[in-house]
Image (cartoon, grey):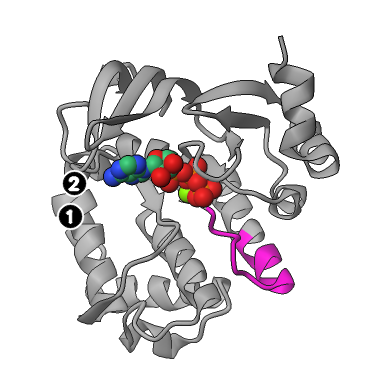
C-alpha cells in the first residue's frame, strides 16, 4: 500500500497550518519527519488520519491512488492507516484487551472473527512482552496510570496488534528511556520487515533513527517539507540544529 499526500493545505479554526505538504510513503519504507516545534508535524498526522477538527483547504490524501478525504478516521483505519498519538489518551473502564479486540474487529470485520478470543489474547500477551510490558497490562484500563514511557510502548503494542499497512508514529520516542528507545525501534523495524508496513516516524532525535534506519528523512518548516534526504540528514540536523539547516537550505 502507498500513502500519497499531494499539495496538502489544511488548518483549523481559520488558521492554515499545512501549506503545500507533499509526501509519499510506500510499502516497507521508513520515513522520518523532523522539524521545529510548531512546524505542523502532528497536524499532518491528524489530517492524514482524518481528525474532524481540521479542514482540508486544498490538495489530496491518497491510499493506493484513491482519495480518502471523504472517509472518517474509522474508515481510514479499515483501509490500513494507523496513528500512534504524541499524547496517548486514557480511557477509564476500558481494558487494553477489550479495546484492542474491539479495534481489531473494527478493522478486520468478519475476517477478524476467525481469530478466536483465546488466540487473540495469546498474540496480545506476546505483543505486550515484545514491548517489555508484562501480561497484567492487558487487564489495565487504556493508558490509565501508565508511565509516560509505558504509554508510548502501549501505542506500539496497538500497532503490532492491528498490523496496519501504513503507520504514523508521532514522537513515540519522546519520554522513552535509552533502553526503551531500542525496544521500540526493534519492534517497529520487525513489523516493517515482517509485515511490510510503511512507517512515518515523527521525531526530534537522531537516536531512534540510528536503530530504525529510515530510508528517507524529511525536514518540515511552516507546514511543508523543505528538504529531504537519507539518514545522514538526521545526523547533520543533530550537529547543526535547525539554525544550520535554515542557513543552508532556506536562505535565498
Ligand atoms: N486550534 C488552533 N488554533 C491556532 N493554532 C493552532 C491550533 N491548533 C494548532 N495550532 C498551531 O499549529 C501549529 C502546528 O502545530 P503542531 O502540533 O502540528 O506542531 P508540531 O510540528 O507537531 O510541533 P511539536 O514538535 O511541538 O510537536 C502550532 O503553531 C500550533 O500552535
Ligand atoms: Mg507534534
Q: CA distance from mark 2 to mark 1?
A: 8 Å
| Segment tinted magenta in the rendering | 171-184
Residue of label 2: 74
Where residue 57 appears, as percent x and y from the top left, is 25, 20
Q: Residue at x 58, y 78 (%)?
A: 132
- Say which of 24 and 163 sits in front: 24
Where residue 158 appears, as percent x and y from the top left, is 39, 63
Marks 2 and 1: CB-CB under 8 Å?
yes
46 up-or-down from 95: above or below: above
SS at mark 2 in the image? helix
Where residue 145 appears, as percent x and y from the top left, is 39, 86
Residue 176 colored magenta? yes
Where residue 113 appears, as percent x and y from the top left, is 18, 61
**In the picture, residue 14 is in which quadrant?**
top left
**In the picture, residue 95 is in which quadrant?**
bottom left
Residue of label 1: 106
Amino acid at each position: 500500500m502507498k500513502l500519497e499526500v499531494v499539495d496538502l493545505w489544511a488548518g483549523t479554526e481559520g488558521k492554515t497550518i499545512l501549506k503545500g505538504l507533499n509526501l509519499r510513503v510506500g510499502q516497507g519504507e521508513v520515513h522520518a519527519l523532523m522539524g521545529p516545534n510548531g512546524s505542523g508535524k502532528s497536524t499532518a498526522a491528524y489530517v492524514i488520519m482524518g481528525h474532524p477538527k481540521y479542514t482540508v483547504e486544498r490538495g489530496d490524501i491518497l491510499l493506493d491512488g484513491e482519495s480518502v478525504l471523504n472517509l472518517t478516521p474509522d474508515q481510514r483505519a479499515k483501509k490500513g492507516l494507523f496513528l500512534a498519538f504524541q499524547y496517548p489518551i486514557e480511557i477509564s473502564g476500558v481494558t487494553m484487551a477489550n479495546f484492542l479486540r474491539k479495534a481489531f474487529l473494527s478493522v478486520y470485520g468478519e475476517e477478524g472473527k476467525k481469530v478466536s478470543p483465546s488466540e487473540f489474547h495469546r498474540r496480545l500477551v506476546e505483543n505486550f512482552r515484545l514491548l517489555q510490558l508484562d501480561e497484567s497490562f492487558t487487564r489495565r484500563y487504556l493508558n490509565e496510570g501508565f508511565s509516560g514511557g509505558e504509554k508510548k510502548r502501549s501505542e506500539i503494542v496497538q500497532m503490532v496488534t492491528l498490523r496496519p499497512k501504513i503507520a504514523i508514529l508521532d514522537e513515540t520516542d519522546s519520554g522513552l528511556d535509552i533502553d526503551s528507545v531500542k525496544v521500540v525501534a526493534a519492534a517497529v523495524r520487525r513489523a516493517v520487515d515482517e509485515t511490510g508496513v510503511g512507517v512515518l516516524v515523527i521525531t526530534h532525535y537522531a537516536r531512534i533513527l540510528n536503530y530504525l534506519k529510515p530510508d528517507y528523512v524529511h525536514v518540515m518548516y511552516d507546514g511543508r517539507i523543505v528538504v529531504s534526504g537519507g539518514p545522514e540528514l538526521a545526523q547533520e540536523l543533530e550537529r547543526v540544529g535547525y539554525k544550520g539547516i535554515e542557513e543552508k537550505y532556506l536562505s535565498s
